[in-house]
Image (spheres, rainbow, N blue to C red):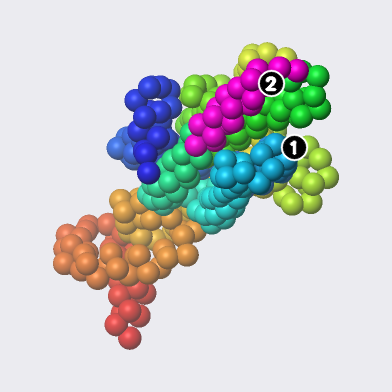
Amino acid sequence: MINFRVIYEYLWTSFRVERDTQLVDNLQQKGEWYAMMIKHTWFFGLFTMLKVLLPIVILSGANIFFVYSRFHGEVMGIVLWIVFAILACYLVFVSLNYLRNFHKNHHQSFEIRNLEDIHNELVEGDKLFTAFFNQLQTLYFFLIITVSFDIIYIIYQVFSTGNAFLTISTYYMLLEIVCLVIQIYFNRLYNIQMINLDMDYILATKDQVYFLEQKAMYTDSRSLERDKIKTIRSTYPNFIASFFGFGDIAILLEGGDDLTHGIVQMQTIQAPEETVAHMYELFTGKWNRVLQIKNLYLRKIAEEQKLMPDDPDFYSKVQQYIRDSEIIIQKDYIECEDAKIKSDIYDLYKEYHIKDKK
């Protein structure tokens, strides 16, 4: 299969599938180790399928009918309607498969997490989207070829008939051309919306918010300092959004209002109220559970190893670190002059290492 992603990234510098992954890498290099990566919920893709993909399927059915009626069982007609049917069915199949994988990979997008976990999620997401994007563009390429051939053949049939413009079949042919052109348009719109599903994001750290909105092949990106943020608002735009727990968030900047460019919005995200609450916890430092660890030596380990107390594997990771660093810990205990920290080292070693041996 042709790697359309490489072609698009070569032609448009603003189209970079790994832009969010590279941003996380840069933040890790600067010493950041926890953040929020906010993406569209899978409902964004589902609604795109209902609003855009469903009309594509209907238009494909109409074009199959026109082709079948025009050729009356001829080989060329059979080939054309089979091609239209395969393209439509395969588009539905790859879309459902990608939507399932997207939901599985990005289901924690409203939580504060370790940047390493976010990085791994984004790397997997890039792989999934690259495969899906290449499939989309391949289908789009074959659709354009098929439609172009069919339109050229229709025009040839129209002008090769002396009184063609007076026949009902000619009007059917012209209607088919209209349907074919509309199908091309809807396919293009569908590609753009699915690109937005994967590539739009808000990445929030304790000091900044990074926002990117992909507009087809072009990008609108901003970096917002925490001090410039006036308020963050969450909304459920309708009953369906409220019922299924997704909605929109809007970040209002100092000096801006709803009528100016001082507002940044992201629509159709999971758990908007929880997302906003977590963002405020991130900005104010209330979330940082590491600072709430009473054992100072354990806090030191958590900070150095970038371990998050909310991580279900926190206990096992600390155990693994103690096993791997037993000599270092014993040296720290011997050389430590602070009675409180020395006591904490003993308690930590006793709690994690001795239990592990049992």
Residue 211 in sight in this render: no
For the residue pair 317 and 264, the one nearer the viewer reads as: 264
Q: Magenta stretch containing residue 162, yes or no?
A: yes
* Residue matched to label 1: 235
Q: Residue at x 57, y 45 (%)?
A: 75
Q: Nearer the viewer, residue 209 or 168?
A: 168
Q: Quadrant of the N terminus?
A: top left
Q: Main secondary structure of the magenta part?
A: helix
Identify the residue at the far front of this view.
162
Picture layout, residue 230 above or below residue 138: above
Which residue is drawn at the image coordinates 69% and 21% (left, top)?
Answer: 161
Q: Mark 2: which secondary structure?
A: loop
Which of pointers 2 and 1 indicates the residue nearer the eye? 2
Task: Check whether the beta carbons of the residues at disc 2 and disc 1 lie within 8 A of each other.
Answer: no
**Amino acid carrying mark 2 in the image:** Thr
Query: Over which residues does the magenta segment extend?
Result: 142-163
Q: Locate residue 206, reporting x and y percent.
A: 48, 36
Give the labeled residue for mark 2: 161
Residue 238 appears in the picture as rendered: yes
Could you tell me how far apart the alpha carbons at marks 2 and 1 are, in whole angstroms?
59 Å
